[in-house]
Image: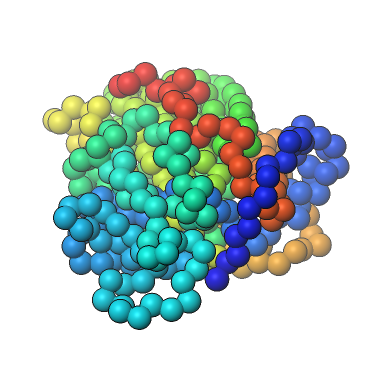
């Protein structure tokens, strides 16, 4: 089992990005995502509808989680409830072998780390998912990646990759102007991309009723580092907003589960885009998997060759450095949160409630 130790948080935390550029470059090129195991975080292990009276098994970094309901309330434990003689209980659960659990946004969230540190204040903010959940099932789904979770998220935060890998769904790279910004703190990283007169996403042209040849686009990816969870929010004019929750659960160090939610409730019920866009996740995930699955083994060990980067890779590079810095801090016994992940992030992602 993984060991957890608690020490007082460090008082002085040097920003790993704003420091010496040579240290930043070294951290980028010494990226070994399989070594990263972040603790003291809420993980959305299942859609609420998937947790029933019969136990279902999930895992976080191979740590077992059995999920079921007792009198309608979601619970989680290290051991199957029929296991009358559990042994080798870890430090991740209480004396009865149970984990802290929250049910929110239509997910059952379980705490991975020291149970004494579990706090609802550390639940990530997802402003466009209803707190009580209850989205129709056609807006929910599950896909898997044969790669380490941090690599999947590094791929996701590079919004420009969609123009090439997912052009048949979300549109190609043709546009008049593109501006990319990156914002971060010790627990999150956010990429904002603005595109002027970008080619209309094919799925919006074919099924969304968009007649124009170009759109004004604002796309955002925000990653909650500890929870390995991302929110993707896109505003398309003309067109409808895209509201995706993309949690990459590290079932093992090289296997990722994605129980996604795409809230298209803002789209008219008569518009096919409302029903087809969530299902596009299955196509998009297969396209992503063709890229990340063969890459993943190449990052299992330190490598002398340097990765090559373009100017648009800023978000991915900073993601690597922030993840590595957080893992190193936890390795020193510091699991404290320095930034509030539950603070409403509507402003930074540009969400206006629609």
Taking 144 as reference, is 347 above or below it?
Answer: above
Display coloring:
rainbow
| Residue 45 location (% of width, % of height) | 37, 55
Question: In the picture shown, does residue 297 fall above or below 315?
Answer: below
- Residue 17 in sight from this viewpoint: no
**What residue sits 34% from the left and 46% below the top?**
102
Q: Quadrant of the N terminus?
A: bottom right
Q: Residue 2: image x %, image y %? A: 58, 66
Spot occupied by residue 163 in the image (x, y as percentages of width and height): 50, 39
Q: Is residue 90 left or right of residue 307?
A: left
Image-based side of 9 in relation to 68, left or right: right
Q: Residue at x 21, y 46 (%)?
A: 138
Residue visible at 37% across and 61% down? 98
- Could you tell me which quadrant the C terminus lies in? top left
The part of the image, by quadrant, that contains residue 336 is top right
Residue 156 in view in this figure: yes
Q: x%, y% of residue 65?
A: 38, 64
Q: Residue at x 18, y 31 (%)?
A: 271
User: Does 187 sit left or right of 348 as displayed?
Assistant: right
């Amino acid at each position: 089992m993984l060991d957890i130790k608690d020490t007082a948080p460090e008082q002085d935390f040097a920003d790993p990005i704003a420091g010496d550029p040579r240290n930043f470059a070294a951290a980028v090129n010494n990226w070994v995502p399989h070594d990263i195991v972040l603790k003291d975080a809420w993980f959305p292990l299942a859609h609420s509808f998937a947790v029933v009276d019969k136990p279902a098994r999930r895992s976080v970094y191979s740590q077992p989680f059995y999920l079921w309901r007792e009198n309608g309330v979601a619970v989680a434990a290290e051991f199957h409830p029929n296991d009358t003689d559990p042994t080798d209980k870890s430090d991740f659960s209480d004396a009865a072998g149970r984990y802290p659990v929250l049910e929110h946004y239509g997910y059952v969230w379980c705490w991975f780390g020291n149970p004494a540190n579990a706090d609802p204040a550390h639940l990530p903010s997802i402003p466009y998912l209803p707190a009580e959940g209850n989205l129709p099932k056609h807006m929910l789904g599950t896909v898997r990646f044969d790669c380490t979770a941090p690599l999947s998220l590094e791929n996701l935060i590079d919004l420009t990759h969609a123009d090439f890998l997912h052009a048949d769904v979300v549109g190609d790279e043709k546009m008049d102007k593109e501006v990319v910004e990156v914002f971060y703190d010790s627990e999150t990283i956010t990429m904002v991309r603005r595109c002027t007169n970008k080619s209309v996403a094919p799925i919006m042209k074919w099924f969304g009723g968009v007649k124009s040849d170009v759109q004004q686009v604002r796309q955002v990816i925000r990653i909650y580092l500890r929870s390995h969870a991302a929110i993707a929010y896109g505003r398309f004019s003309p067109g409808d907003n895209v509201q995706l929750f993309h949690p990459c659960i590290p079932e093992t160090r090289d296997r990722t589960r994605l129980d996604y939610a795409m809230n298209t409730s803002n789209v008219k019920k008569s518009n096919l885009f409302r029903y087809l866009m969530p299902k596009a996740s299955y196509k998009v995930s297969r396209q992503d998997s063709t890229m990340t699955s063969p890459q993943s083994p190449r990052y299992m060990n330190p490598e002398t060759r340097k990765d090559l980067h373009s100017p648009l890779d800023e978000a991915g590079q900073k993601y690597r450095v922030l993840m590595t810095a957080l893992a190193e801090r936890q390795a020193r016994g510091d699991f404290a949160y320095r930034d509030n992940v539950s603070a409403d992030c509507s402003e930074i992602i540009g969400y206006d409630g629609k």
